[in-house]
Amino acid sequence: MADAHDQAVMDSVESYLSEILGAIRPLQSVELTLADAQGTVLAADVTAAWPLPGFDNSSMDGYAVRAADVAAASAGSPVTLPVDAEVAAGDTTPHTIAPGHCIKIMTGALLPAGADAVVPVEWTDGGTSTVRITAPADVGHALRRTGDDAAPGDLLLPAGTRLGPAQIGVLAAAGHGTVRARRRPRVTVISTGNELAEPGQPLVPGRIWDSNSYMLAAAARQAGCDTTRHPTLRDDPETVLAAIETAAAGADLLITSGGVSMGGEHDVVKAALSKLGTVTFRKVAMQPGMPQGFGLLGPSDTPIFTLPGNPVSAFVSFRLFVLPAVGALQDLPAQREAHRQARLSEPVRSPAGRRSYLRGILDSRAGAVTPLTGQSSHQIASLARANALIIVPESVTSLPAGQTVDVLELP
Amino acid sequence: MADAHDQAVMDSVESYLSEILGAIRPLQSVELTLADAQGTVLAADVTAAWPLPGFDNSSMDGYAVRAADVAAASAGSPVTLPVDAEVAAGDTTPHTIAPGHCIKIMTGALLPAGADAVVPVEWTDGGTSTVRITAPADVGHALRRTGDDAAPGDLLLPAGTRLGPAQIGVLAAAGHGTVRARRRPRVTVISTGNELAEPGQPLVPGRIWDSNSYMLAAAARQAGCDTTRHPTLRDDPETVLAAIETAAAGADLLITSGGVSMGGEHDVVKAALSKLGTVTFRKVAMQPGMPQGFGLLGPSDTPIFTLPGNPVSAFVSFRLFVLPAVGALQDLPAQREAHRQARLSEPVRSPAGRRSYLRGILDSRAGAVTPLTGQSSHQIASLARANALIIVPESVTSLPAGQTVDVLELP
């Protein structure tokens, strides 16, 4: 009966996420050094201003030649050429080879004018005044031509690219000392609850150690955010509202956990924010994580997520809703979740009308996923063992072993 | 001819990696706060010192009852019970319910003695002095029992676990304010070469912007290391050796790039390190990345990798050899690479006797991978577009479109 009522008013995961993504505006772009830019998202296309490589150069250590001069070379009948000079990587003096001559050249060195091939040192006697060449080199052999990686104007990285090591590398290779990217989102995480104690401190029955703020701060940090963990707050609406409003002024995104269940006066986050009218609370047709709240706060319309207090609910909610919101702040192109598929190694059950996200261990090689025991939303020990979430659709209440299911890998 | 010679003396990727992993000793373990521990690797098993949860509590907002007292409740014939008290999350006062009575209870609150079930508020009129209950609750309904997540002595996280958000969460939930983990590896990255200029500075022909040190520093940072990028060094063996020895004293791992090709006097890194006798240079049967060097340096036996100077060679070498070495420093259990499989959307070629790692774009949903154009080892623009490396075995020189291949996903 209660379930039937719940279903009638619940949002789907997709509609809730759409609403969130529709409300979030990307952060301003800033100019970042390459060292600071790692993990951020490009705010504008980056094109090549110069060709890459910038000049014809050798891809091997050897001898720059005219290919015609070594066409007849063989082991039985080597060609011997005078070596006029030597050019190393970094040498900027222009050289020219005369017909029938050669220049010793190192990997990456500027190709002398007149040369159209490099004979690798391994095909020679390595001579310095003259060199014996025992194999021919075709025109273009061991050469890297100007612009063969990118021509001026070529798109190197489109706006919306997240800058990993390879992208940082191409920016540097193309001469960019700085780059226009979205500021790293500043995220503040706040746990509320009279029951919360600091890990490492002694407990009395009725109290628990706060895990959500540590877990959510770590998740936000993993998502590339500059993250602040606010000290836990007691269940007092005025205190909570004041702390949230102060935090909103210095953050690009706020996350609270706890204080949003269905019981009324003790739901301190709901009580504090309901007055403002810009944060809405609703049920989402999922398990764990049904009670959700989202809105915009303060003069800068800072997005706020009020996540449920159960640790697994908070974790799954972060993964499904907050992580895409962080992407939206960075103007990362929205993309459908890339679910893997795997065979269930054991049967599972799921409530009607709610999409389940069950903790599991995915064996990618075997293409199999095993649901863990301990699927209640307070059971964080099984969460720490999981490497994937098994998705059971809303319409399904049980699945047999062997069934293929969508899984969401955990980073 | 040269190829035949090369193959005779080349190491396989596996034998080279085994040699590296066999030489590396794990870092000392240290006590880290939870905020500092993210991304590090546990140095010892973590077991539960107390049960999780630490006390019987309610999983919902509702009324703590004796199940027998509400067994007859129905919508048509509700049961009304006096409400003796209210207990919220965080309340530490012990309560007891008398037969035929109940206590209002919030999610996470300590279960009163005598109660064996919680009736959700949704099944009641929400009363405060008396409550009308319209459905029965079985024994155990909406209860979380002491230790149902973990019992004292249960293994929560084994040594060798990398601490992500969920693992940080379970450590906090179990009361650990600090944790014994491996120190974050300190990595120093050094590029050498007279040709190198700083990105953002003007260039003359013959010079290139240094990309490797930025790219490799970013890769080490992504792997969880505290990373220092050394200013680029000119090709002078004494300068290079002095810089490397100084860096070795303050790092857990050194990475150089460049200065290790086959031409002799200009191979400054090889020249500088060969004197020491503890770094060996060899060819590995792969492409890109054939010329490799590895050894231990200085009084602390600091591991050093001398990576090739071509950016793609350096990147692939980092992924195949340095990344597992970082794992070994952290005492992360060695594990076989989890290759995905995908169908080639275009044919590929590969040199005989060398394993190719070709840049590609993997479409996980379609199970297809498309090799990129621009596979030379200096072509970093295509690397920045790739999300996977296509692996072509040593014995294979060409593969047709449609062939299933192993791919290594890039993070």
Image (cartoon, coloured by chain):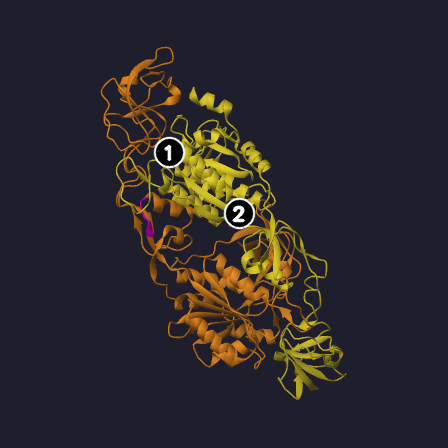
Chain colours: A orange, B yellow
Is A176 magenta? The answer is yes
Mark yes or no: residue B260 visible.
yes
Quarter occupied by residue A311: bottom right
Q: Are the residues under marks 1 and 2 on the same chain?
A: yes
- Picture residue at 70% right of the left edge, 70% below the top: B55
| Vertical arrangement, residue B128 with respect to residue B142, above or below | below
Q: Nearer the viewer, residue B39 or A338?
A: B39
Q: Position of residue A9 (x, y in %)?
A: 51, 74
Task: Compare marks 1 and 2 and give the one earlier in the sequence.
Answer: 2
- The residue marked by circle 1 belongs to what chain? B
Is B386 magenta? The answer is no
Quarter placement of the N terminus of chain A: bottom right
Quarter occupied by residue B235: top left
The answer to whether residue B112 is left or right of residue A355 is right
In the image, what residue type sits under mark 2? Pro
Q: What range is drawn magenta here? A: A174-178
- Picture residue at 41% right of the left edge, 65% below the top: A21
| Vertical arrangement, residue B131 with respect to residue A52, above or below | below
Identify the element where label 2 is drawn: loop
In the image, what residue type sits under mark 1? Asp
Q: Position of residue B76 (x, y in %)?
A: 67, 84
| Vertical arrangement, residue A19 with respect to residue A237, above or below | above
Q: Position of residue A346 (x, y in %)?
A: 65, 54
Q: Nearer the viewer, mark 1 or mark 2?
A: 1
Q: Main secondary structure of the magenta part?
A: loop
- The residue marked by circle 2 belongs to what chain? B
| Vertical arrangement, residue B171 with respect to residue A143, above or below | below
Mark 2, residue position: B185
Identify the element where label 1 is drawn: loop
Mark 1, residue position: B235
